[in-house]
Amino acid sequence: MDEVDNIIVVSLRQIGCAIDENTISLTTFSTDQVVEGCARCLKLIDESIELPTRLPESMSVRFRVGTALANACKKVGFEGEVGYQTFLYSNVADIRRVFMFLLEKLPRESGDAEDSSKSGAHLYHRITTVLARERSRVWTPLFCKEQGLVSHDDGSITWEGNQGIRPHMAVPVAAPSGLAELGKRTNKDLCHYYRNHLPFVTAQPQQRHQVAASLLERSTMEVTAAAEWEHEWNTNGLPSRLSEQEYRQRKRERLHKRLTDNIRGSVLTSGVSTLLRGSLAELLDSFSSDSHGADSQGSRFSHAKNLQFTQADVSSQVAATAAAPAAETQEEIKQRREDELTALRSKLDAASEAVLTMEGDMQKFSTSMSKVEEQSKTLVEANSTGKDEYKLKKRALEMLSNVDENLGQLQGLVDAASQRLVTLAEQWEKHRQPLIAQHRALKSAQSELSGDTKMMLEEIPHIRQRIKELMEDGRAKEYLNKQLSEELGQLNKTLNRSAYTRRIMEIINNIKKQKDEVQKILSDTRQLQKDINYLEGELERAFAVADEVIFVDCKKHEINRQIYKLLAKLHETFSGLLEAIRETAIVVRENRELEDQIEKEEKKGMSQNLQRIESDCNAMRQENRVLINQYKVAE
């Protein structure tokens, strides 16, 4: 059983049991190790089972834990005899049987690898473990946790409390974009800016705790924008049969036109000054044409330019005045400069008012000019209409001088036109039939093509979704492969799988041989039982024949009566002997069974368990006395 014990020990180490590397057999297992191994196996078999992995100090609680373990084993399907004594006062045979059953019931990771990778079974197990541990602990107020650190029974330390909590404040962060596209060339100046001037994203926020929130917000915005664009492209872009660049350009043009129309409409309908209207119009024209031409006359830019030149002239005049003879005092010079500035400012204000007045006049003139142009256009159209009517009436008056001849000519022209229309109609019918057939054929082909195209457009989103699912599945399998590779690297390299496999095959062959021998013994026993039954039947038949023969002659002679009595007594004696032999065999078999049970009980170490039970009983009596004394003191 050493190989079986070694396999059990290795399996328990793999599920997280704290077992020493030198332990290779179940004979050296302590009660705590037995309880920990069973509890961990039951937890992996059924997530709803909550059992402690260590025995407490109190004996009553120990018995309750042992009973809970026994009930959990029965719950998962263990059919053997199990109780609290199996774990508290264990023997190697019972523990080996329990561990073999539990290890066989463990979920197979190879069969559920894909499902566990998708559902996150490992993460779920860790979360449930932490939650169960936190639920079993006593709640402690936040102000009682020094510096937010909490130590656990297993020696680990976790960060709790609200000392390390920071508000979720995000700030805009800039990151390089477009560098991952291999087929697109990036601007050298932009690369230089990214390489030498753009700070790291961890250095852009002012506070250190704002980095995570900023990155999360930026990633969320990018993911949301990508999802919205994909939805728009699948909904509106694909049916338009345009490329992505053409669709984006057309959308940009529509947005630009709508923005321009809205700004112009709001400016015209609101009470904005003429100067501001002209400036906005020039701004929109320059924005729409993307050209930077010269400023129009009367715009704000030209006024600003003129004002700049006026201020420059004023500055030059002031400088010339400052170059006058130094005979004047500083106060006089300052007073004279102020007077000149006041005069120039008044002139400037007057000129600005004159410019505004002229602009108003020009606006009125342009309005009246547009009205005059519209009236002139209307008159020109009316004049051309009158000329056409005059020519028609003049021709009619000329034709009235010779009515009959003109009517005949007109009738001939009408007949010729009618004949020509009939000829054209016949020619059109000749050309119309093949054209209609061709039109119907093209229309049917177009409908079939549009149906196929629509079907393909409907399949494209499903194909994209399938591609995403396959990519996620590939990433999940890569992660699972990496995790399994790490676990394989952490396994003990000294374990020889082929040796275990060879030993298991040898055990299986030995079991087969034992089964064959048992079958042979059973067949021999059946044959022997058949022989015994045959001999007993033959004996009964021989006695019946002898009894009948002697009974017939016993009436004639006295000696025959004695012979008959002796025969009956002999048959009874032999029957008693056979019954005694059967009882002796039963006693021998029971004796052998009792010897086997005694040997089993000796192997179980009942004397040691009895000593442990006596010590536990003494400990329980001591606990009971302590509780009685506490109760008396409380009274």
Image (cartoon, grey):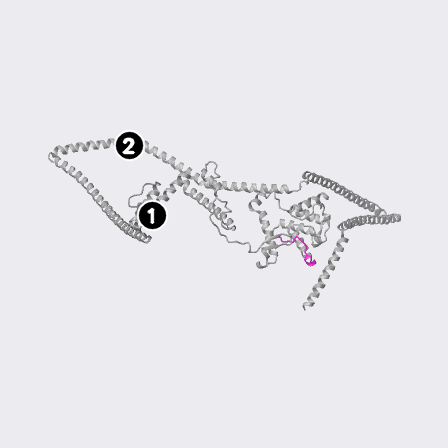
Please state which of residues 336 and 24 is positioned toward the viewer in this rendering: 336
**Quarter occupied by the C terminus:** bottom right
Q: Using the numbered discs, state the Cα–Cα distance from disc 1 to disc 2 in whole angstroms.
A: 56 Å
Task: Tell me the SS state at disc 2.
Answer: helix
- Residue 78 colored magenta? no
Total numbered labels: 2
Residue under circle 2? 429
| Left or right: 541, with 365 as reference point | right
Instruction: Check the image and name the residue furthest to the left.
Output: 401
| Left or right: 184, with 563 as reference point | left
Q: Dominant secondary structure of the magenta stretch?
A: loop
Query: What are the residue bounds of the magenta stretch?
Result: 48-61
Task: Tell me the SS state at disc 1.
Answer: helix
Mark nearer the N terminus (1 vs 2)? 1
Tell me, yes or no, if residue 536 can be seen here.
yes
> Splitting the image into 4 quarters, where does residue 623 fall?
bottom right
**Identity of the amino acid at label 2?**
Glu
Instruction: Check the image and name the residue furthest to the right.
Output: 559
Expressed as whole percent of the image width and height from the top left, the position of residue 424 reads 25, 31
**Identity of the amino acid at label 1?**
Ile
Residue 163 — which label? none
Residue under circle 1? 263
| Residue drawn where x is 69% and y is 67% of the image | 633
Expressed as whole percent of the image width and height from the top left, the position of residue 446 reads 38, 36
Q: Comparing marks 1 and 2, which lies closer to the viewer?
A: 1
- Residue 53 colored magenta? yes
Tell me, yes or no, if residue 271 can be seen here.
no
Expressed as whole percent of the image width and height from the top left, the position of residue 544 reads 81, 46
| Left or right: 325, with 374 as reference point | right
Label 1 neighbour load within 10 Å: few <14, some 14-19, many 20+? few
